[in-house]
Image (cartoon, rainbow, N blue to C red):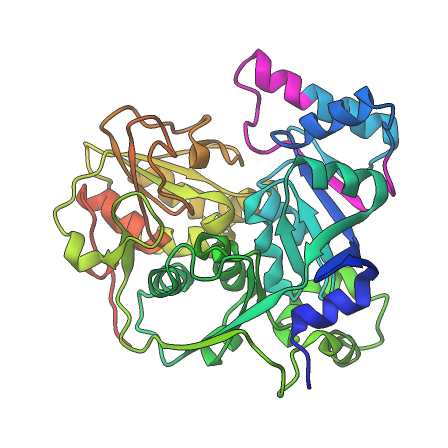
Amino acid sequence: MGKTIAEKIFKAHLKDEPFGDVSVLKLDRVFCHEITTPTAIQDLMNRGKDRVFDPDKIKAVIDHVSPAKDSKTALQGKIMRDWAKRHGIKDFFDIGHNGVCHALFPEKGFVIPGFVIIMGDSHTCTYGAFGAFAAGVGTTDLEVGILKGVCTFKTPQTYKIEIVGTLFEGVYAKDIILEVIKELTVNGATNMVIEFTGNIVDEMTMDQRMTLSNMAVEAGATSGICLPDMTTVDFLWPFIKDQYKTRQDAFESFSMFSSDEDAAYAKQKTIDVSNLEPLTTFGYKPDNVRSVSKMKGTKIDQVYIGSCTNGRLEDLRIAAKVLKGHTINENVRGIVSPATPKIFSQAMEQGIIKTFMDSGFCVTNPTCGACLGMSNGVLAKGEVAASTTNRNFAGRMGKGGMVHLMSPATAAASAIKGEITNSSLFCEQGR
């Protein structure tokens, strides 16, 4: 019987099987940010275990509240800063060099096919876009990872999602993952690995695959994995070119972490997206999904474009194309946050930032802030946001606020109209 990519990664990293279906895996990376890691650091210090298993395999960043907004968040940053210095963690990205973790770390080449990665953040599943097993963990597991370089997982079952068809213009990876979540529901893949396959996934850029994998957790999945291919190799080539003679050699090496044709899956589903329309959420769960056309007339107070889901250069370029030559509605606050300094610089060089500013958007530094209602775009009670983020829970962007999730194109069009609107109203569309 063949094996899935997740099963192959588990086998390659297995350190122990203490009981039943529980596996202790060796970690290739432990990623850290200033919201969840300080608690782990302080607990290790209190127990006399202020050590790290390998400073070169730990990557850390301040991103959720950047820069600090008050004394509490300043202290969280200081704990991270002091810890990184104390242990010689050279890949610590402080204010001015920092970005949204799930955009910054792939951009730096820290994620490689076949890796096992943990972080105290539920959207760690984003790194599965590269053919890695990546999972968000709690404080105890994060502490063990930092100290020992291992983590315990149940042997994974895999839910294979084959995405096929031909997309309409104006339909993007965000619409696809919203459709997947709608069909699976928020607990449809609980404690499973989603393996994304099909011609649509094969044709996606790495930015698009990261959007897909990022929201796998919203269907309950532990991780969302795409199989590594030449698109993966091309993205990583600047970081791996000294390890392989050719890109083909790299591809062949990474191919060891691809699912076998006769691999066994716990569940399988095929989704044809040929007739898929732009989608958005309603209500307070990510599986509350409707077509944008059915949400026509829904007034909004704020549009937010950014986050680890849709704050990359490709996302900003798509939104700017819709905004070009238009001014956002006078009753709407537009906020855009490029996910990393590199993305910000590229967006400036390409005139994307100017387009946002000319249309009336406020451009902020890279940060997660607004996504979880901590800074840089918090909603007031009763306010409504059209957002390219990943969660629409009650109060997610501010107590008493409502969040509608959507693609950058739909968000940009909605900013112009002042209500949830299809981007086809503002640019040419077709198949």
Q: Position of residue 429 (x, y in %)?
A: 25, 69
Residue at 71% over, 74% down:
257
Magenta-drawn stretch contains 85: no
Is any atom of residue 324 visible in this view?
Answer: no
Magenta-drawn stretch contains 54: yes
Q: Position of residue 327 (x, y in %)?
A: 24, 41
Rendered view: 228 above or below 50: below
Residue sitting nearer the eye, 294 or 377: 294
Residue sitting nearer the eye, 397 or 416: 397
Which range of residues does the magenta coloring cover?
Answer: 52-77
Q: Position of residue 399 (x, y in %)?
A: 33, 26
Q: Position of residue 320 (x, y in %)?
A: 37, 51
Residue sitting nearer the eye, 405 or 67: 405
Residue 358 falls in image quadrant: top left
Residue sitting nearer the eye, 241 or 71: 71
Residue 33 falls in image quadrant: top right
* Outermost residue, left side: 297
Rendered view: 138 above or below 25: above
